Amino acid sequence: MKNILITGGAGFIGSNLIKKLLSTNKYNVVCIDNFDDFYSLKQKDLNISSFKYHENFSLIRGDIRNLQDLEKAEKIDVIVHLAAKAGVRPSILDPILYQDVNVSGTQNLLEFARKNDIKQFVFASSSSVYGVNENVPWHENERLLPISPYASTKLSGEMLGHVYSHLYGIRFIALRFFTVYGPGQRPDLAIHKFFKSILNNTPIPVFGDGSTSRDYTFVTDTIQGIEAAIEYSGSEFEIINLGNHQTVTLKGLIEAIENICEKKAIINRLPNQPGDVSQTYADIAKAEKLLGYKPQVKLEEGLSSFLEWYKKESENI
Ligand code: NAD
């Protein structure tokens, strides 16, 4: 069995990934998470509740910036680095903290990998690195024009990965996630916020005229790509988009959620937010070629699955 260290495993994507990896019986999973207070700790406790006593799972309550915490993880074969300060808008309010966790934290983890001879490192990057590049769909070789501190920390993480891959032979796979959604989604993200407000008859904040668009990826599809990256051995350094290759406007997303809830949204229209890009759209040919990645879940199906989770768990988060 491979020993995998997952950072940020109490979070949205991490906890869904751990569930999936444990179900294969191929991996021992060690998770490090500091249960950061960016959102409800109840939600993070719920995220890990179904596997925290699994025989192939162990949890380190610790910080990726602290080498002593990392050293509690022993005999690791692969690191999947998901821990981060996430979110574009809050990064504008506290850019130094984002730099500290996302860049220094990533470097600390790479140092840990170097010292412990860990040769495979999968990194959660983000579509936000493309920023205001209008040449969509974005191919991995496109020019990068980030417009938020968060995006720039993700780009720095990719570049640190290149350095460590080149100097120390650590295979580094940066996966650029495109707006991930599904059960356990972070409460600061649009789909979660919109369902919550529509169901509670409260206004939803809509930034801009509704014409911005996103390439939404259902979390099981993202995980399919992460699993393939854990096993990838074709080259030493890669950057790969994990999107859906389908875009939806904000207006279209709200309509889809209204249809599923059979209820109209109350719209609170607000100006466009600094740091937000007008569109995201992934070219996923490279992911298909290198990782066999093929997104499966259509938006309506994914939204229904979120709603099912939300109805069951909204009291517990
Ligand atoms: P999340 O906030 O739910 O999970 C991140 C986890 O990291 C949290 O549980 C948090 O407690 C932990 N963490 C934060 N700082 C830490 C530290 N210093 N030490 C240890 N743990 C720490 O976020 P998510 O949506 O699951 O995102 C996972 C990763 O994917 C992040 O790196 C994020 O930037 C990236 N990403 C997410 C999306 C998306 O749409 N959700 C899109 C692009 C990239």
Image: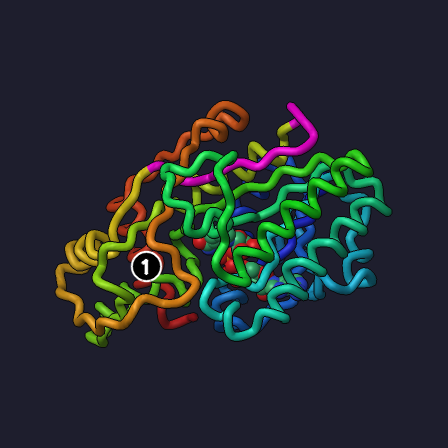
Q: Nearer the viewer, residue 188 or 30?
A: 188
What kind of colouring is applied to the model shown? rainbow
The answer to whether residue 201 is above or below residue 240 is below
Residue topped by disc 1: 191
Classify mark 1: helix, strand or loop: helix
Q: Residues within 10 Å of mark 1 (few under 14, many from 20)?
A: many
240 left or right of 297?
right
Numbered disc total: 1
The answer to whether residue 101 is above or below residue 165 is below
Query: What residue do we see at 57% from left, 64% from top?
Result: 85
Task: Tell me which image quadrant ligand 1 sits in.
Answer: bottom right
Query: What residue do we see at 47% from left, 63% from top?
Result: 88
Beta carbon of the mark 1 residue lies under 8 A of ligand 1: no
Q: Is residue 244 magenta?
A: yes
The answer to whether residue 150 is above or below residue 38 is above
Residue 75 appears in which quarter of the rendering?
A: top right
Q: Is residue 86 magenta?
A: no
The N terminus sits in image quarter: top right
The answer to whether residue 264 is above or below residue 155 is below
The picture places residue 97, in percent across and down from the top left corner, at: 63, 70
Q: Which residues are magenta?
A: 233-245
Query: What residue do we see at 80% from left, 57% from top?
Result: 72
Q: Can residue 182 be seen in this snapshot?
A: yes
The C terminus sits in image quarter: bottom left
The picture places residue 105, in percent across and down from the top left corner, at: 70, 59
The picture places residue 124, in percent across and down from the top left corner, at: 57, 48
Q: Can residue 11 be seen in this snapshot?
A: no
Tell me the amino acid under the disc marked 1.
Answer: Ile
Query: What residue do we see at 78% from left, 46% from top?
Result: 113
Q: Nearer the viewer, residue 217 or 285?
A: 285
The picture places residue 40, in percent across and down from the top left corner, at: 49, 73
